Image (tube, helix red, strand yellow):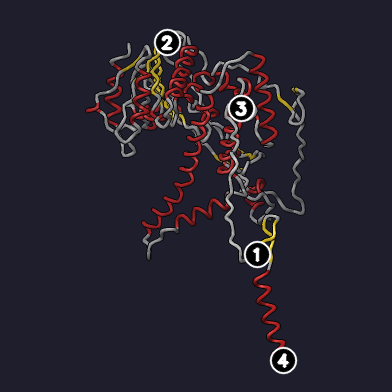
Amino acid sequence: MTAKRIELLYGFLWEASEERRWHVGGGVKKLSEPCVEQTFTPQPVVQISKNNSNMAARKLTDFQVLTRTIFGILRTYHHQQTIRKTIQGSTKILPRVIQTKIQIANTFKPCIPTVDTSHLLQENANNWLQTGLQISDEHHTHTISALLSKLTKMTKEDEQRAWEVAGKWARFKYHNIQKGNFIQAAEDLDMMGIRISHHRTLIPDTTILTTQPKKVKTRRPQRPTGGQSSLGSTMPSLASIVLPSTNLLLATGPRHSQTLTVGVASQNLGFSPIIPLTPTTRRPGSEALRRALVITKTLPEPEPECSRSLTTEDYNLPPTSPTNVATRHEHHGDKKKNWSLTPSREVLIIGSSNISRLPPINNEKIHVDSYLGANLIQAAHLIKYKTPTSEDTKEVLLCFGVNDRNTENIAILDNNLTQLLSSAKKTFPNANIHIPSINFSPGLPLTTIRKLNTLIERTPGHISQLDMKDFSTERDQVHWTQETAKKMWDHWRSSLPL
């Protein structure tokens, strides 16, 4: 390239840089000219008023609130039952639960642990499952109590319709919801004054009411073949061995030898689903075992002068005390199903687990029943639905409330206490109802218990607290000591017309 061409090229580039034009806002402008700063003016934002009827939140009607509340009760009962079934026998979940328990036990495993340390770690891991189930049950119980407090009274037709709509929602969302959940919800609604017919069910896809239950297809179990016997045929339970009863009254005449035959009754053993019911091979000794079931026993001839009836003194048994009647009721995971009450005396003392710590009461008029973990609403359900009406009962003492210590809403506490009193008055129409105030240790929620004691003090048959200098609890700060239980009974006895 020559020098002249290079000079022409540089000149061209310089001229282009000076005269280059670019488009700004529709006009032509040189780069050398000063730029005018353009400012952006924001447009005013149009705000939508909260009072606008089209954008405001839609207010629910009483029918909608009632329907949603009933659906919430059904949903809570369904989840509670699902968790219990998962813990009690699910073959899919149980291995994972065991694996998690092992991980918990080995999380803080010390170096070269001793036998005692290993046992403590295993016990701690075993407790987490029961604790989790208890927390879940308490949560569901408080949720149901909160939902029941939101119920609103309507006409009988609207209440029935709300029940049917809520039931349709529940069946559509939870296909495996059980009939027992509907029965429990219907009993709770009836307790709150909303009486519905829970026998009328809705098909999920339609609104046609039906009273015909669905047919369940069953299949007859097949017997094992090929010279093998099932697990039930080779392992008879102890309950299936039928032994003839013997009479304790010895006859005067001589008895001859007789043959006692032990029969094995065929029955369904009902093993847990985690045990595989697979056929097992018959062992060679099973035939000999079968022949050994026929036992020949010769009874000795009694002496003629020994003709008398045997009593408890012949066995050195302690004499029974029919005057002291106290029953401790376990719930086995389902309080509504497994709890019941049968009044048998004039005075009933009913309460939670602390009642079982009372000393023996040798009084033919008093019957004591304790229900572990019972709160106010559960006690109301027990007395209303699982207790027959007793006109002979004269005095009833209800010691409940300490298990409601986590219910902070005073409206819920007031409602539950009212339901308990109402149920007791209907079941025991001729009895005086007494509710003692709750003694509590400083470690419990003081605000809630004080609110509940304020409500209890308004009841007609109120019994004051035990003097705090005589009150003490175990380490859990809930259960009474034996000395406190004795002083508590002495305090109550002075207030009861015995």
Give the residue pinned by disc 4.
2
Q: Amino acid at mark 2?
A: Ala
Q: Identify the residue at the far bottom of this view.
A: 2
- Determine crowd level at label 1: few under 14, some 14-19, many 20+ residues with C-alpha closer than 10 A: some
- The quarter in which the C terminus is drawn is top left
Check the image and report above or below for 428 versus 213: above
Q: Are marks 3 and 1 in contact (CB under 8 Å)?
A: no
Observer-nearest of 116 and 101: 101
Q: Amino acid at mark 4?
A: Thr
Q: Could you give the CA–CA distance between mark 1 and mark 4, rounded to whole angstroms?
A: 32 Å
- Determine crowd level at label 3: few under 14, some 14-19, many 20+ residues with C-alpha closer than 10 A: few
Q: Which mark is residue 30?
A: 1
Q: Position of residue 216 (x, y in %)?
A: 75, 34
Q: Along the polypeptide, which appears first: circle 1 or circle 4?
A: 4
Q: Position of residue 307 (x, y in %)?
A: 45, 25
Q: Could you give the CA–CA distance between mark 3 and mark 1, rounded to whole angstroms?
A: 53 Å
Q: Identify the residue at the far left of this view.
A: 469
Q: Could you give the CA–CA distance between mark 3 and mark 4, rounded to whole angstroms?
A: 81 Å
Residue at image x 65%, y 71%?
A: 18
